Each structure stands twice: as C-alpha cells, then as structure tokens.
Amino acid sequence: MMTFKRTLVVLSSLLMTLTMAAQTPQVLGDNHAMWRMNVDRQYLLLPVQEKEENANVRVLVDNQQAQNFNLRLAVDKVDYYVPLDIRRFGAKKILLDINFHGDRRATGAMKDFICWREMKQSDTFDTTNRERFRPAYHHTPLYGWMNDPNGMFYKDGVYHLYYQFNPYGSMWENMTWGHSTSRDLLHWEAQPIAIEPDALGSIFSGSCVVDKNNTSGYGKNAVVAFYTSAGQSQVQSMAFSTDNGKTFRKVAENPILVSNLPDFRDPKAFWNPEIQKWNLILAAGQEMRIYSSPNLRDWTYESAFGEGVGCHDGVWECPDLMKLQVRGTDRQKWMLICNINPGGPFGGSATQYFIGDFDGHRFVADKPVKTKWMDYGKDHYATVTFDNAPDGRHIALAWMSNWQYANQVPTQQFRSANSVPRDLDLVEYDGDIYCAVTPSKELLQVRGKKVKRPTPACEIVVDVKNDAEIVLSNTRGEQVTMKYDADKHEFAMDRTKSGDASFSEAFPVVTTTPVYGDMKQLRIFVDHCSVEAFDAEGRMAMTNLVFPSEPYNTLKVKGGKATIYQVNL
C-alpha cells in the first residue's frame, strides 16, 4: 500500500511554513557559485529541473565539508523540489559551494538562474501523491529515485526493505540506502534513510542478515549489513544495527573485501547450516565469487562461478543463492540468481538463474548451457529474497523497471516501484528443473469484491480452457493484449499499443515466455503503471510497465472465464 503512514518529519502537510531564502549568489566563475544562508527551518527545499546537467553541491559548515551531493538545480523552470535537512548540521549558518556542469553559455547569466529565487526553507516537506502513475499496492519511495531492493530481512513480525535511493532527484544519482517497513508486504511505512555515502563512496546494493547467535560479536539478533562502497573503486563494506535496522554503525575495518576489478559489487550473505558458517556471494565482472566466514567479519575466498555458462551479454549483478524444494518430491536443489544488464531476453536488464548443487564452497550448475529467466517481462530486475523469512519461505522482490528507460519514464515526483512479492520454489518439466514464481499469499488478503470492469488497481483471474486471449483496453484505443498458446505452452503480452511510449524506442515490445506445464488459471495484477501476469501455480511470470493515458476499463476474454477483483488496501 503506497498511502504511507506519515510518521516521519519529512511528511505531508497541506500548509507549509516557508521562509524564502532568495539572495544574490556569489558568482566565482563560469560554472562556480557560493550561496550563504542562515538556518531558520528544518529543510532547505531545492528546486530541480530535470533537463539540466547535474550540479555538484558541497555543504560547508565552519569551513569543513558536511555533505556532498549532485542534483539538477533549476535554471529557468522548476519541475519539483527535494528537501535538504539543514538542521542536522547543528549550525546557525551554512555555505553551499556549487559547481554547475556543462556549457552554461546557452542558459543565461548564472546570477539570474531561477534556483536562487526558488530555494525555500520549511519545517515540512509535502509528499502528497501528485502522480497518476503511482501504484496503489506496489512499494514506491515517497519521493525521489529508487532502483535495486537491498538488505531485505524479516524480524519480529516486520519486513524490512532497503533500496537504492536518490534523495535529491528522481533520476539515478547519490546512491543511498532508503528504508521502508511492512507487516504484510503490501502496506509500507517510510522510514528515515538508513545508510548514507561516506569517504569510501556511494552506497551501492547489498544485503542484511539477522545474526541470531551473535557470531559477529555485535549482539544477539544484531542486524548486519553488507554493501558496496562505490568510490574510485568498488569495495565491500559492513555495518551493524542493534535497533532492528533503524540505524546502522559502519565498522572501522571497512572495506572488508577488495578487488582490482572495476565491477565488484552487490554482496549477498546468508547462514548455511550445512557447513555451520556464513556464505557470501557477490558479482565480480561476469562471474560470481563465493566466500565463507564463521563470524561475518573474517571472509575466506572459496570459488568462482560463471565462466562459460548462462548469458554474458552484460555485467552480472545482484546475486542470491538459496536451497529450494523441488515441488512434489523429497529432493532439494540450490538456485543461484544472477541479474544481468544488458542481455535480457527482450533487451536491457533481466534476471537469470541456475539450478545446481552447492556444498558451501563451490556451486555447480546442472545444465550450464541453457539460459533460464525468472521473469520474461521487460521490467523485472535486481531480484533478491528476504533473509530470515518466516516458515522457511523464499520471498522475492524485483525492481520493476529496465535500465534502457528507467530514467525517462513519465513520472517526476518519484521513479520506480517494486514488483508484487513472489514466493519461489522449483518445478520439474520436460526433464529439467525450473524456478516457480508464485504471487505471495499476502496478495489474497487484499483481494476485494468482484467488479464488472477493470479498475486502476485490480486482480484479474482467468480460468483458461485451452488457447486464450485477454485484452485490457480503454476508450482511447490503448490496450494490452495477452495470449496463451496451449499447444506451444507459451504466453505472450503485447504492450506496443499500451499508452505512452514516446520516452523510449525500447519500450514498445511483445514479450513471450514458456509455460512449464499446462496453464489452468492465469492471475493478472493491474496497477496504475504495471501489468504482472502469473500462472496461478507459478509456472511462468511476466512483469511489464504500462503508461495509459486513462486507466484500462474494458476487459475482453476469449477461451476463458474472467473474474475481476478490486484490490482493497
């Protein structure tokens, strides 16, 4: 649910108390200016213009740098505002040292930029939804840019989701760990930023574990985070939390793992009971490296996986490694998740996986030649699972976008959402083993009354007899067409006429997926900007964004019977 509880300081307010901060900047060169201000309120609201190049902003307090970030400061038009917490610096005066990038000759005199007139101080920041494409039951940030889910764990009845976050704009920059919590994977509450950039670099993707037995020495049930510090090189760092993931303390020994590779990132740690140690897997160029540790602090390199197997058309990223049950048998197999960008089956980023065996030291794939994709949609990436999930479940979330156009999708207050939660297990089909992706049971709890027409946020259940065609459309002639071919065991979704696709030539596409068995029921989750289709038994999954000019309000079905449910939050 994306009507977040407004319990933070940066919250929705209909009436904002503002102090105009306009003054003449000190122009020091073609691209350089300084701007001095008295601290009167909690936040400085910074005006953003997305077409501009990034400006680098250094916050100076008593001649020392207190913060450094990039944002697209408005030159002649304000698209939206982002908040800078200026009370946190504990000073009465601060100095902004600003370097504008790019050629300024076409934009007029720096002293006349609109940003100087539009900077405001306020004790609140309005996060009221202003976006018609903001999902109703998918997780999104209150504002700003989001990509990979990070550090997900479950503890004391609460799911914790961290994510790659830009607090200073709705395009990729200033990577930080944002934080949201939920008790049911659907109603999310925004929390303060968890881990911020430091002298080692920006905070890239990683994982958290619950150290139940205090192997690390940070306390029983401490939450230990691993993340990539992305500075001049990419290195691995560590932090721990003794307040259930609300705040983290970075360890003095950072970085804890280094490499001479330019792409060395995204550590995923987990407890392996078979060796009574922790394992950690991370992406290193176009392979995965595996480590072990008795205490989460001292890591031993074990092996590498990836050479000559799977898709190598892009950089390997965001791994996960888990042991899963093969449905209907007493066997278990290991699955290694490997996200890749580019190289997806329909261009851009996607999630591939490998089935095999793992002894705590080395992962060996069963059939390394064949590439297997977890989701055959265009918008499913950076998929990882929750640590310590209840009842032995393996619950996954994905970033619901694609690097081909993620910065250009038609929203501004925020960009990007997460997929609906999915439970993972394994199924056998035609002599091979595949990942089954089933909508998490929590989605049934928000299934509301039956309705005759699709609504902007709904679930459509189609009982399939044989071949089937499902068309979602609106009065503007925009439509999403889905087809199931029973003989070929194939499902397809056509979004070429789904709505606005002007922002990217890569957006209009027909995506197709194999179905690992006979499909009897199709579950389709429609939200304001997405259509996610699943075989009810998890034998296929497809996630695609859509941006219709009006919500789809007509459903036509051939070869099946459809029931439409409202989603009640």
Image (cartoon, rainbow, N blue to C red):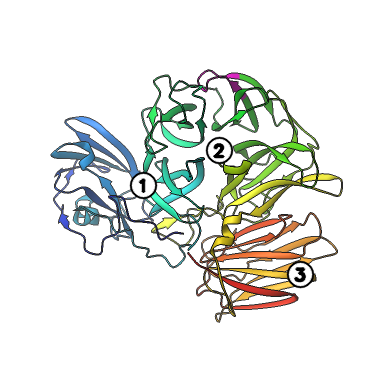
Q: Name the magenta segment's main secondary structure.
A: loop
Give amino acid for label 2: Asp
Binning the other alpha carbons within 10 Å of mark 1 as few (below 14), some (14 to 19) or many (20 upward) gives many
Residue 294 part of the magenta-drawn span: yes
Mark 1 or mark 2: whose residue is earlier in sequence: 1
> In percent of the image, x 53 and y 74: which residue is there?
455
Residue 359 percent across, percent down from the top left: 72, 25
Indicate which label's residue lies in the foreground, 1 or 3. Answer: 3
Tell whether label 2 touches label 1 (CB within 8 Å): no
Question: Which residues are the magenta region?
Answer: 291-300
What numbered label is drawn on residue 417?
none
Q: Is residue 198 above or below residue 134?
A: above
Residue 303 percent across, percent down from the top left: 67, 22
How far apart in space, not on screen, are marks 1 and 3 (Cα)?
Answer: 45 Å
Q: Quadrant of residue 533?
A: bottom right
Element assignment for label 1: loop
Q: Is residue 162 above or below residue 569?
A: above
What numbered label is drawn on residue 464?
3
Element assignment for label 2: loop
Q: Quadrant of residue 281?
A: top right
Give amino acid for label 3: Val
Which residue position is annotated with label 2?
Answer: 387
Which residue position is annotated with label 1?
Answer: 167
Q: Is residue 273 visible?
A: yes
How far apart in space, not on screen, are marks 1 and 2 (Cα)?
Answer: 26 Å
Tell whether label 3 touches label 1 (CB within 8 Å): no
Mark 1 or mark 3: whose residue is earlier in sequence: 1
